[in-house]
Amino acid sequence: MTFLERDPLAPQAWFGNLPAAHRYTYGLAGERFFRALKDEGKILGSYCPKCDRTYVPATAFCERCLGELTDWRDMGLVGELHTFTVLYVDVEGRPLETPQIVGLVSFGDGGIVHFLHADPESLVIGMPMRAVLKPPHERQGSILDIQYFEPFQA
Ligand SMILES: [Zn+2]
């Protein structure tokens, strides 16, 4: 059967690997957010006074009113656990030797999805979680400059 004889509406499958390369750029707001994380160890948010919303990670424009956001705020390193899950396989579906916990930690009206270091039985939605950063000389301007979040008690 040739390519032209195939039914174009029939389900198709690709077996094997597809090599792919990509380059992700942070953009203006992302650049500022990740530079502050790397250089100052800060999690920045941007505030829209018209909508009374704080975006984390910080964005350059409000997603509701599309207004430019110029009020950047240090959100601190302690957020609130919004949700979490326990992973038993990696992104390729291979079993993990040690299960990992991934959660959404809320800051302002946004949040950061990241690894959590905790006993999953001890996690409670709404509990404070603190970002544990890499030492300054190891930071590279990536979300992995945050090593993980852990339960925090003031
Ligand atoms: Zn707005």
Image (cartoon, rainbow, N blue to C red):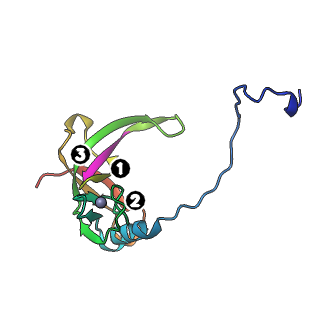
Q: CA distance from mark 3 to mark 2?
A: 17 Å
Q: From the viewer's perspective, tell me whether residue 96 is left or right of residue 40.
A: right
Looking at the magenta stretch, what is its main secondary structure?
Answer: strand
Specify the quadrant of the image occupied by residue 136.
Answer: bottom left
**Which range of residues does the magenta coloring cover?**
100-107
Q: Position of residue 134 (x, y in %)?
A: 34, 63
- Classify mark 2: residues with Cα within 10 Å, few (<14), some (14-19) or many (20+): some
> Is 51 located above or below residue 150 in the figure?
below
Q: Position of residue 63 (x, y in %)?
A: 36, 56
Q: Position of residue 29 (x, y in %)?
A: 40, 68
Q: Earlier in the sequence, mark 1 or mark 2?
A: 1
* Residue at 82% across, 27% down: 6
Specify the quadrant of the image occupied by residue 40.
Answer: bottom left
Q: Earlier in the sequence, mark 3 or mark 2?
A: 3
Q: Which residue is mark 3?
A: 81
Q: Amino acid at mark 1?
A: His
Q: Amino acid at mark 2?
A: Ile
Disc marking residue 143: 2
Q: Nearer the viewer, residue 24 or 10?
A: 10
Q: Is mark 1 within 8 Å of ligand 1?
A: no
Disc marking residue 92: none
Task: Report the residue that reaches farthest toward the right.
Answer: 2
Q: CA distance from mark 1 to mark 3?
A: 11 Å
Q: From the viewer's perspective, tell me whether residue 89 is left or right of residue 133.
A: right
Q: Amino acid at mark 3?
A: Leu
Q: Which residue is mark 1?
A: 114
Q: Is mark 2 within 8 Å of ligand 1?
A: no
Q: Is mark 3 within 8 Å of ligand 1?
A: no
